[in-house]
């Protein structure tokens, strides 16, 4: 497509998408408050302040659990070295301004989506670009990304999109600078999360195979670059995590059952397979000279289309233990993001290539099918975004608001008691000692009331009371002694409790945060 119309259409797309994001998430961002899930990583380095110095950020970065494990034991249970650096930079820039964090993230989603849209638009035209946007933004994995600040996938998007752009430019234009820059970018992407290096190896192999079949040497080179960089990072990851990680092989039957069960309830899962029957039909008409495409390139497009379903099954496998043995739908969680990107890109490339290679009969029909798929996404989702995304948005807003209200109410009750010359005890509690929202609650209360002691019960159920007791102290808590417990009826207390059910403490005024019970299932 010519440069000027392409630029105008890209700006129009960016404007429309920005408007949709503001319409759907404007209120969410306006009422942004920290979440008991994830956001302790942001607030901990800040202490009771709103910002941190470079020295404080550097000290916190050095004290990251994985870095400390590597320094003291020579091995670490996780491999996310690049993620911690990016998170530390963001913490330094944005501090405790949660609204600013969300604004930056949504600008990231807007800019990265627009960048890939512009690549598809310039190379393959309007129908393919719209198909990419519909399959990408209409995917339900965004429900676990848009309303949150913690998922590593956010940083993966930040690095992965420039990597796609560099490889695309190399394949399309042959600029060696793009390939050279893609190599360090790929290494950085691989170091962002454990699953990234195997993903790079798989996609690299796919590019090599497709490039070989279609006779595109630059695609082979791009695939080789991903293969080599992915293998390097993977070997480093194995060396670092060997002996520390305690994961074993997962039986394939559980993930396979999860795959079939959740796939049956995913309307878009069937829609994204449309390229396969289209390619089958094209294979038939190719003999009538209506399509100028080689058998090798056609085989490459078929391979790419089939690989989308292989990726779906793979994601169910590698995330099986993190989804309560498949009870939750991995594709509806952040783990499904690679599929959202892959299926959108493959569908856009397949339809775009067929449209460019087809004659006056095939080209408009292919474009028409692409537009029909876009409309199907809008009809199924009742809009661009999945209904799961909007349900998740509303839940996170309510959960975070309820948390903020409970912490504010605790501060008000303590202030009123002190004005009346009383000295009640402040307690943070949850179902078990190690539960992340409960640990975060200690930190949130301590940040709101830095001069108040926040007690926790060291006798709460726990798989490792000693470790999580120390972690509770690290996050600002003080263990409640038997003597203090005995004095509660006389002194009085304010007990802030986070759980999926109501909690009662006869000695305290209890402020329950139970919104988590209504969290939408992925």
Image (cartoon, rainbow, N blue to C red):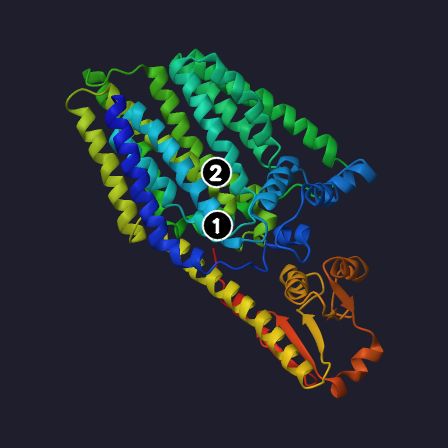
The answer to whether any part of residue 187 appears in the image is yes
Q: Say which element carries label 1.
A: helix
Q: Is residue 459 above or below residue 126?
A: below
Which residue is depicted at the point 39% across and 32% down? 115
Q: Residue at x 55, y 58 (%)?
A: 34
Q: Position of residue 137 (x, y in %)?
A: 37, 43
Image quadrant for the N terminus?
A: top left
Residue 420 falls left or right of residue 107 = right
> Residue 198's image quarter?
top right
Q: Quadrant of residue 364?
A: top left
Looking at the image, residue 228 sits to the left or right of residue 292; the answer is: right
Residue at figure coordinates x 56%, y 49% from the top left: 150
**Mark nearer the N terminus (2 vs 1):** 1
Callout 2 crowding tier (Cα within 10 Å): few <14, some 14–19, many ≥20 = many
**Is any atom of residue 329 visible in this view?**
no
Q: Indicate the secondary structure of the residue bearing disc 2.
A: helix
Residue 382 x/y as whole percent: 29, 54
**Residue in front for this viewpoint, 46 or 431:** 46
Q: Which residue is mark 1?
A: 102
Can you name the residue that lies furthest to the front here? 419
Q: Position of residue 508 (x, y in %)?
A: 68, 82
Q: Position of residue 41 (x, y in %)?
A: 64, 51
Foreground residue, 29 or 277?
A: 29
Q: Nearer the viewer, residue 266 or 188?
A: 188
CB-based contact (under 8 Å), mark 2 and mark 1: no
Q: Which mark is residue 338?
A: 2
């Amino acid at each position: 497509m010519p440069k000027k119309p392409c630029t105008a259409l890209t700006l129009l797309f960016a404007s429309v998408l920005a408007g949709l994001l503001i319409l759907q998430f404007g209120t969410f961002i306006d009422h942004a408050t920290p979440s008991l899930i994830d956001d302790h990583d942001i607030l901990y380095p800040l202490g009771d302040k709103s910002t941190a110095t470079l020295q404080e950020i550097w000290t916190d970065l050095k004290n990251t659990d994985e870095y400390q494990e590597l320094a003291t034991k020579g091995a670490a249970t996780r491999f996310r070295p690049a993620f911690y650096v990016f998170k530390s930079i963001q913490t330094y820039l944005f501090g405790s301004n949660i609204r600013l964090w969300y604004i930056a993230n949504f600008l990231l989603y807007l800019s990265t989506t627009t960048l890939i849209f512009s690549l598809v638009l310039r190379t393959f035209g309007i129908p393919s670009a719209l198909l990419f946007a519909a399959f990408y933004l209409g995917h339900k994995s965004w429900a676990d990304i848009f309303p949150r600040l913690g998922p590593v996938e956010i940083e993966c998007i930040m690095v992965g999109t420039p990597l796609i752009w560099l490889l695309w430019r190399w394949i399309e234009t042959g600029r060696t600078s793009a390939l050279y820059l893609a190599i360090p970018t790929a290494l950085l992407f691989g170091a962002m999360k454990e699953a990234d290096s195997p993903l790079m190896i798989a996609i690299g192999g796919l590019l090599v195979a497709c490039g070989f079949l279609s006779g595109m040497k630059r695609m082979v080179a791009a695939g080789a670059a991903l293969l080599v960089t992915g293998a390097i990072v993977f070997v480093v990851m194995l060396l670092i995590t060997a002996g520390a990680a305690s994961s074993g092989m997962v039986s394939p039957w559980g993930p396979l059952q999860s795959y079939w069960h959740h796939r049956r309830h995913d309307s878009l899962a069937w829609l994204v397979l449309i390229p396969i029957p289209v390619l089958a039909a094209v294979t038939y008409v190719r003999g009538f000279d209506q399509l100028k495409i080689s058998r090798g390139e056609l085989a490459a497009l078929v391979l790419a289309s089939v690989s989308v379903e292989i990726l779906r099954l793979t994601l169910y496998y590698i995330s099986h233990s993190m989804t309560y043995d498949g009870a939750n739908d991995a594709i509806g969680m952040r783990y499904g993001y690679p599929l959202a990107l892959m299926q959108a890109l493959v569908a856009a490339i397949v339809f775009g290539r067929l449209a460019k290679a087809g004659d006056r009969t095939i080209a408009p029909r292919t474009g028409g099918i692409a537009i029909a798929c876009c409309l199907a996404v809008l009809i199924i989702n009742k809009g661009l975004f999945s209904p799961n995304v909007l349900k998740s948005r509303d839940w996170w807003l309510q959960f975070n608001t309820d948390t903020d209200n409970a912490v504010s109410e605790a501060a008000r009750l303590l202030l009123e008691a002190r004005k009346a010359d009383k000295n009640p005890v402040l307690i943070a509690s949850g179902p078990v000692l190690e539960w992340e929202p409960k640990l975060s609650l200690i930190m949130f209360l301590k940040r709101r009331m830095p001069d108040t002691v926040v007690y926790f019960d060291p006798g709460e159920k726990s798989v490792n009371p000693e470790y999580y007791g120390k972690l509770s102290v690290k996050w600002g808590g003080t263990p409640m002694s038997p003597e203090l417990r005995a004095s509660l009826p006389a002194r009085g207390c304010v007990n802030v409790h986070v759980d999926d059910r109501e909690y009662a403490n006869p000695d305290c005024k209890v402020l329950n945060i139970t919104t988590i019970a209504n969290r939408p299932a992925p």
